Amino acid sequence: MPGAASDSGGGGSAGAGALVPLSSETKQSPVYPLRHSVGPPVSPRVSVCWARGSSLRVSIFQQQSPSCGEGDVGGEVVEVKLSGGDGEISDAQWRRIAYGSMSPFAMLQSRRNSVSTLSRISPSPYHVDWWEFVMEYSKDINALLGSPRSTPASVIEDPKTVLKKSEKPTSLKAAWELMELFYADKLSQAWLPERLIDWLADYDSLFSGSCATVHSKLVDFQNELINIQVIEDNPRYWEVIGSALAVGWLEIVVKLLHLHGSYQLDQLSSRETESGLVEAVAVLISRMPRMRLELGDGRLGECYKAKPDFIKAWEKWRAQITKMDCSAYWIQCNHLQTREGLKNLLQIMLGNTNSLSSATYHWLELYVSHFLYVRPFTVGLESMHGLAQKCIQLKPVPRSQKLMGLLLGILGENTEVVLAECSKQFGPWMVAHAIELMTAGSDEAESLLCEEHYNLGELSIQELHRLVYAQVLSSHAFTWQIAPVYLTSCMKQGMGLLEILLCKQPVQHNELLHKNLEICRLYELDSVSSHIMKIAGVHHWKHGRKGAGVFWLQQARDEFRLHKIAQQLFASVGKSISDESFKQWEGLIELLGSESKTAGGLEFLHKYRDFKRSLKHIHDGKSIEAAQQAVESLMLLMKNPSTPQRFWLPLLYDSLKLINWQDRPVLNVTQTNLLLNRLQELSIARLRPDFVEADLPSQALSAVRLALATNLGRAILEE
Amino acid sequence: MAIAQLPESPEIHKLPLHKYVDAVRWLPSISALGRYAVLASFDSDSDSPSIEIHSISPSKNLALASTYAPLSSRISSLKSTRFADRPIIAASTHLGSFHIMTVNPMDLSIESVAEEELHLGGASCVDLVDGGLDCVSVGEDGMVNLVSLGEAQLKKARVFDANGLVSYTAAKWASPTEFATGGYGFSLHWWDRRKPGGPVSQFKCDRVQEKASGIVQSIDIHPSRKHTCLASGSSGTIFAWDLRRQQEPIILSGVGMGEGVSSSVSDSEIWEIQYDRSIRPSNAGSRILPVMICSEDGILAVVEEGEEPVELLAEPCAINSFDIDRQNPSEVICSLEWEAIAILSRPR
């Protein structure tokens, strides 16, 4: 499955420490045990080659050829599956994503087709709404990548639980959401900084692995919380509150502030001023004006959609903070830590860059805090990118973090970098699907991705990545059936590769064969379908399943092969259509059908069966009608050019009883003459070297000749 | 009936398994409390097929109860029944081996009773007599085998060997002495244990429009109508063969099956067919009883003669097998191509 084999190196273009491409803690080379039944001594020579997907085919031989013994194996071919993936997402999980993303992708493609047909007829307003379709697609895929983020807490909240527990986020989902909000979601374009703040709130924990984060500090503090007696004396308390405020997690800040000791009932009277100050700051925080589309339930802050309203509210709020900062009550506050801590919070809210810098741990947190408190009016990717560069200089970049390169590529509006990061960090699935978002993002990206490139063999980048992903799908026995959806969306090479894929599927199992043929039917690939049927027919035939072989060759209307196998069948017919084995043949002959247009000479069997049947009736009774019917069948057989020559004598020999019919001759003169002619032809044919002698008693020919001559005489007399 | 009452849609639970499900059956209930399903699964990571028993909670959550792994290859056919208060499982594999297992009612462990190499490669199909220990096993090699588990020993008998001239793809008991088999070219054979040596009767369903023929993938016979053999297979074909009217099949669905067939429930392979046991047979008259099918194009539907099919499930992937719970016929379990199963609870 997709997954970068090389996961080393820094986190993208700006990766600090990228000078060391191979880290010293090189991953231990994985060891794959081989299970085989080749007895010792095993030859030191093994042959290794690639098999399907990411598995190796290893051939093992015994040193000497096995001396004797039934169970001894001289050599064996085993397949070793190399585990792919990077551990974050298992192979089974990747398959689940592959299954689930097929339908949204197919839906989007069919919409694109119908939109482009419509717009060709008349320049319609449909194109305007295209991003809404992309958005729907993106939402469907996002839902696949993980459950929605933290759910609202239960009714009775644990006052000591600051962080809500939720499913561990994956960087794949984080990356997808990042792409969605920058490229697909046109509604968020005006509120990109705010969306980025929300995004970091959801995924800050992803960076904890490579450096300190606000999230990791909060987790540590929460674990200690039970053991802390006087919380406001603890410097860590004020530290995490400041950090959480800096990245805009207002709910957590207010909740933490309410843990302050002065709120306790027994202390309320003695620490009135202190408690009043804490509350005043908490109220200020919870009234922070935000310029965004909406605020979810339970989120603090005041939401403004229009810029003028926001500016007014923002200035008023800032004025309140300044006023608060100069308040006379601070002097009355005796608790030093509280005073210092609260003052620091006010500095953060006032956008003091030093306070912000010391409250945050990596550049993205600092970046977000600037959006919140220093430059709330930032718009446009250019200014966002400029700010990002500044923050990177001030704070460390989380190393070997998959998302950094991607984010910087997006901010730098560099489509190639984004594409390369997607491919390197998240594999072919991500690229094939994210291109849909990128082409919706800008016309420039669209022309880069959809334009045919000479150096890619006249393919577009979009098609190339779809083909790569289809290859990945094709390499697994469970996912190959999805590949056609992606291949058919490729204009240039898709159909050709699809035909190859279908023709290469194994045909041994009925189910698989039918699934394969079903895909041919869906895409109207009749020639491929008949090709597969031919392969299946020959496969079954070779493995002794003659009926199945004939069936598939008949389905494929393969006259040529049917004729070939007919010759082989006839060789066994002569011997085996004796009376007791007749039942075995019955089924096959039935299968051939009455009007065997596509039986390739096998219709002879049908007539032969009829003849044998009527002959049997004669043995049972002695009615003249049965005899006449048998004669008719015999004449049909002997006249028919498809009756193989080698059957002539056995047929005549079988009908000796007819020819020698006691009461009166049942064959007339012309019929007898025809049979005599055939006998004559046979005598000439016997001189040819390739003639196959029938398995009959040696006197058979003379017996038939005699009987025919006698009958001729009788018939002439009769007439 | 002026206005057709729209049937309430069933409650659907889809459960991912992260393994391919080759076949699925309800396990005849052991106790009044627990409900269990038996699955033939295939894990591609370890390349290992296995038979698993899962318990299903009332809220339709799966919990693995036991596994049986020593199988030579993937399962091609799986059936379950109950004998002497013990669930019995019969299975055949793609390499032609045949397994009979019982389930220990105490700890739900699967115990092997018999294992035989009955067929020479090629997929095969098994069927267990209702509430008995007779099992018929047919294969693409053209062999028809009977395996009977007597008091103490296993009795094997080869009923017929077509030597590969005919391949069998489906089998179903009609009574303890008779069974039907299906194969290529929409052919059906009727067998009677009392008349050995070959099929008692045979039938081939030819298409009206000479296009292409198909394969019988599944057969069902209703215990109250043993003379009618219901079969389904390629190109959405469903037909019934009445032994009393030998050459006139009743065609319920199918592509290119002629004028009489109004609608086809599916255009692709119908993998399995069963009589819909949730509908009482009394009011059906002489018509074919309602049947349920699952298909390669992802449809699970109820088909009635002369009526539009009712789709219960329409998936983007194939539905490979299904089973209706005998004790509670409103519940249906089915296996989806994309490594999942679905459980449907129909309103009663």
Image (cartoon, coloured by chain):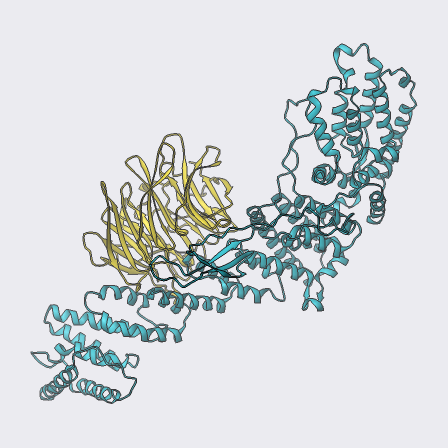
Which of these two is toward me, A22 or B34? A22
Indicate the position of residue A492 as horizontal and vertical percent values. Answer: 63, 67
Residue at figure coordinates x 75%, y 14% from the top left: A264
> Could you tell whether A69 is left or right of A328 in the image?
left
Query: How many marks are shown on the rendered structure?
Result: 0
Quarter of image, res A494: bottom right
Q: Is residue B88 above or below residue A5?
A: above
> Is residue B221 visible to the viewer in this orientation of the structure?
no
Indicate the position of residue B178 as horizontal and vertical percent values. Answer: 24, 50
Q: Is residue B171 above or below residue A669?
A: above
Indicate the position of residue B281 as horizontal and vertical percent values. Answer: 32, 42
> Is residue A216 visible to the viewer in this orientation of the structure?
yes
Q: Residue furthest left?
A: A663
Tint applied to chain B in the drawing: yellow
Quarter of image, res B207: bottom left
Indicate the position of residue A611 as horizontal and vertical percent values. Answer: 21, 73
> Could you tell whether A160 is left or right of A542 in the image?
right
Which of these two is toward me, B230 or B39? B39
Tint applied to chain A in the drawing: cyan
Residue at figure coordinates x 43%, y 42% from the top left: B333
Which of these two is toward me, B129 or B52? B52
> Could you tell whether A670 is left or right of A433 in the image?
left
**Quadrant in which the C terminus of chain A appears:** bottom left
